Image: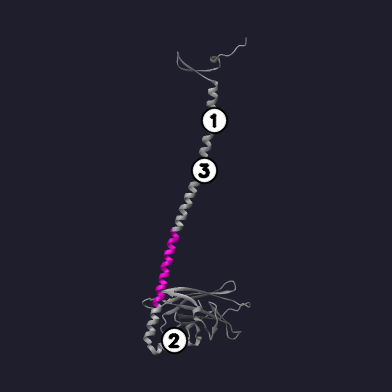
Amino acid sequence: MKKTKSKQESELTIMVVKKVGKIRSFKVSPKFLFWASLITVLYLFVSIFIINDYLEKRRSNNALSNRLTALQNELVTAKRELYRSKQRLTLLENLDRSSEAMDKKEMSKDGPEKTEQKKTEPAPEERPPDVFEHVPENTFVDVKDLSIREENSTLKLEFKLVNTKEDNDPINGYVHIIASNSPSSSFQQWSYPNGPIKNGLPVNYRRGQPFIIRYFKTIEGEHPLNSKGETPSLIKIIVYNRSGKLLLIKEFEVENAT
């Protein structure tokens, strides 16, 4: 007859010695030990996967949080710039209204006969330049700190347009920069901003560079040099108010401008 192993022979006996003479023992099934070890190993692998996934999501969440904070800061900055732009636009609109009110006030002072005469005159931008040849003594506008330099076949200019009023009321209008070479050579003229010139003055004063000044404003301009490299010898700065009245004509020799 074949011998069969009893259940007791197949079990593992674990003995624990605590003190001399005291021995504790218990039996464990090999199958139970195998499955317990397998579950423990699987638990470790699953734990490692879950922890790595948690750390990856945490890093991604931190990156998104930092991006959201940066976007919020950009939004705050954009709102500030928009508010400042609205304030500037409101200021310009108020200045425009005040200028129109002053023009209407001047027209009402002239009387009905002069008003009717003005209505028959052409629009300011259509008038010939010789209408504005007279410059009043007190224009309250001046040009200071003119600098001229050559850069990449271009003559670049920079100066300060100064409000000389004592009360510093805003002055607005248009400024033109006209450069011309020596009459001894082939006479040429350049206008900035670009536009037609007649008798040394721009035909359309509204094509000039607009400005509004309370104290001073830095104006920049440029004139391209011709292929021969001839530099203009004279710079003329012309200033009109919004209604087309000539406020200032100031000439500078290029060699003496600083």
> What residue type is disc 3 on?
Glu
Residue 170 in view in this figure: no
Tell me where residue 164 sits by quadrant.
Answer: bottom left
Q: CA distance from mark 2 to mark 1?
A: 100 Å
* Mark linked to residue 56: 3
> What residue type is disc 2 on?
Lys
Residue 67 in view in this figure: yes
Q: CB under 8 Å between callouts 1 and 3?
A: no
Helix, strand or loop status at disc 2:
helix
Neighbours of disc 3 within 10 Å: few (<14), some (14-19), many (20+): few
Please, is residue 193 above or below residue 119 in the view?
A: above
Q: Main secondary structure of the magenta part?
A: helix
Helix, strand or loop status at disc 3:
helix
| Residue located beneath label 2 in the image | 119
Instruction: Tell me the residue at 53%/36% (across/down).
Output: 48
Q: Which residues are magenta?
A: 76-98
Please, is residue 46 above or below residue 164 in the view?
A: above
Q: CA distance from mark 3 to mark 2?
A: 78 Å
Left or right of 182? Residue 89 is left
Please, is residue 146 above or below residue 120 in the view?
A: above
Tell me where residue 100 sits by quadrant.
Answer: bottom left
| Residue located beneath label 1 in the image | 41
Which-is-in-front pick, marks 2 and 1? 2
Horizontal and vertical percent position of residue 155:
56, 75
Instruction: Tell me the residue at 55%/22% (across/down).
Output: 31
